[in-house]
Image: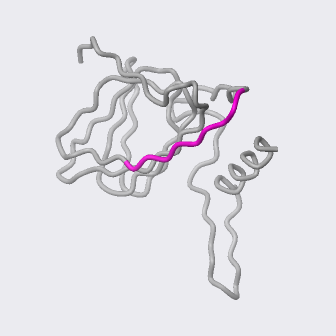
Amino acid sequence: MKRLFFGLWLVLLLSSAVQADDSTGITVATLAKASSSWDGTQLPSYPKDMPEVTILRITIPAGTTLPLHKHPVINAGVLLSGELTVITEDDKSLLLKAGDPIVEVVNKWHYGKNTGKSPAEILVFYVGSPAIPITVKKWLCSR
């Protein structure tokens, strides 16, 4: 039952149609709907144990480079403000500007870099399970 609820919630969140209710002015716009991450890699299957959703608002100061890390779980987000470049260990990159969505790479080493003049703020939704961390940092790395 929880999987059904979660599946319905995810479908509503990532609905592919843009809809408007004329009487209320409510609109729904799809920002992302994908079965692969931004670098073209197919997303993995969901874990079979209890689902866990984590939502983070992350602020990255101007001039900051995040440590090399990976996400063992599916995640997607929207850059709320600023600019952010995401770079994989094999040098693929994606430049995000305010309002841009991202379906993040899973189990691939990558990092983010704010080369803008203002903080970058991103809202990220992680879909995993209590037994799986949402982020793993690679402590010994060189860039």
Instruction: From the top left corner, tell me how far across and down residue 78 is, in percent.
Output: 46, 51
Residue ID at (58%, 42%): 53
Residue ID at (70%, 57%): 12
Residue ID at (50%, 35%): 104
> Which one is nearer the viewer's eye here, 132 or 105?
132
For the record, the magenta segment spans 49-57
Instruction: From the top left corner, tell me how far across and down residue 115 is, in percent.
Output: 21, 42
Instruction: From the top left corner, tell me how far across and down residue 125 is, in percent.
Output: 52, 45
Say which quadrant the C terminus sits in: top left
Name the dominant secondary structure of the magenta segment: strand
Residue ID at (56%, 33%): 37
Indicate whether 27 appears above or below 7: below
> Which one is nearer the viewer's eye here, 36 or 60?
60
Residue that protrudes farthest toward the top in the picture: 140
Q: Quadrant of residue 35?
A: top right
Is residue 56 found inside the magenta-colored segment of the image? yes
Indicate whether 132 appears above or below 19: above
- Would residue 126 be found to the left or right of residue 58 on screen? right
